[in-house]
Amino acid sequence: MSKYKIFTIIIAIGVFCLFLACEDKTVTQSEETVQLSGYVFQEVNGYFSYISNTEIKVGDYTTTSDSLGKYSIDIPKGEYAIQAVHEQFDTTTTSVLNISSNRSYAIKMRNGPVHAVAGIVTDTIGAVVEGAIVVLEHLRDTTDINGEFNFQNIPSGQRIMSCDYSDYYIFSDSFEITNADISINIQLVRQGYNISGTVTHPVDGLLSGIEVVLDDSLYDTTDINGEYLFENIFIGEHQLQIHSSIYSGQTIEFISSKADFSKDFELTKPMIDTFWIEQDAMVQTHTYKPYDGISSTSSEDVNFGDFKHLEVSYNHLEDFSMIQGLYIDHWASRVFIKLPIIDFTNSDSVKLIFSTGYISSSNNIVISGLTSDWDESTITWEDQPAPNTNSIIILPVVNDSAKWIIKISVNDEIFSDTTGILIKYQNESCYYMCSSTLALYSSEYENIEKRPHILVYKTE
């Protein structure tokens, strides 16, 4: 065998042995390596904070804690003393530890930097708040006469502070302490509540455009629903005033608490006079047509001038019965009112008011002037005066006091005619079946307050 071949074989054997040796070492190291992990922290006055950028030395092995103070290092099994080094803390060295398996170990640093956290508590107008409770996590302080608070020996880190005082909203915020004392000025916002209500008049109903003044400094005007609103009003003593050129003003004083406050106002205004209706009457027709086709009519010649109730109505019924066969039953009622002569000079508003006993449906009413005079003791359906061309159509609305209120225009010829007015439903006929009734108290009713009348108001 040549020397060259022998040399080649020796080289090959050496490489193979080296490969085996390396493979053996890797397995051995893998079997003997364990992981040591944990956190680096400090504790001052009950505060725990994690420390970043701390050098951790375990034997010949070194690592550094991350931004959360966490570290992790792979080392062979064995006994070690752990050393933690940070420029702002005393170096910490643990006792010798037997680390034979994966292990977690927290390292506490000592004599690190601490800081003061101080500040002033004020309100939104800059006034200092004395007696506010300031809480810095588990520590608390109370502001002095100057609104100042102070915390000492607070370690670096992310902190949460809150402040609470009486009728103010609770303040809460987080901040970070780095390497210096910190000053925090807290501004408290007083808790605000709503003050609202509705302004009405017993006859005119909901009043819009009424000025409402709170504490001589805040102003609002009632909307179309008669409502006013003041938002975010502080707790305490307040005054509400109602101003109007038409209605009588009102003033109240009250103390609000930790809740919304509601106050409704019912205004009055000077009344010139009350004019009572003295003449009114109802006329009625009733037609009944049975199966034989022969109609019978009643009530057309009857006078109802002394009735205690007036009725505006129409009723129509077409039916079939086994006894009567097909029949039609129809009746209608109308009301005549003679208005008193009134001087409307300088009047602000005029209302014709009926007290209602019953209303069965909401259908349009026609109010018309008349072509001739009439008398309540003699008027009937047959000889009722005809309406003239002056008329208005309204939908009767009965309020919570069971009153039907008609606003009279002082320039409307309908209500200035001495012959009076006719009140009837716009449609007094229909097909098959229908019914509408509006029952009113007449001038003959025992309770005078429920008799029809006119109220006249003027500007104050």
Image (spheres, rainbow, N blue to C red):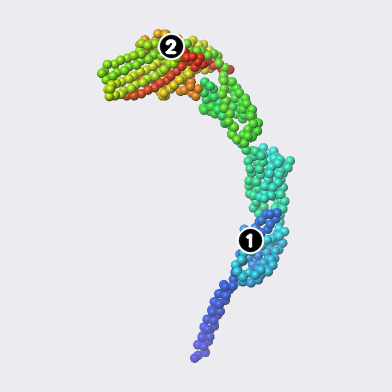
Quadrant of the rendered image containing residue 40 = bottom right
Q: Is residue 209 visible?
A: no
Query: In the figure, is residue 411 to the left or right of 156?
Result: left
Looking at the picture, tell me which residue is in the foreground, 12 or 287: 287
In the displayed structure, does residue 189 sit left or right of residue 275?
right
Q: Position of residue 401 (x, y in %)?
A: 50, 22
The residue depicted at 37 percent of the width and 17 percent of the height is 332
Structural distance between the alpha carbons of marks 1 and 2:
103 Å
Image vertical order of residue 143 relative to residue 418, above or below: below
Residue named by callout 1: 39
Q: Nearer the viewer, residue 294 or 51?
A: 294
Between 41 and 291, the one nearer to me in the picture:
291
Quarter occupied by the C terminus: top right
Residue 172: image location, x then y, percent: 63, 46
Amino acid residing under circle 2: Asp
Residue 36 image position (x, y, % from top left): 61, 66
Going from the N terminus, do you reach mark 1 or mark 2 first?
A: 1
- Name the outermost residue toward the left: 292
Which residue is rendered at x = 53% and y = 14% of the image?
274
The residue singled out by tag 2 in the image is 306
Q: Secondary structure at mark 1?
A: strand
Q: Residues within 10 Å of mark 1 (few under 14, many from 20)?
A: many
Inspect the image, locate mark 1, and give the three-letter code of the amino acid beneath it. Answer: Tyr
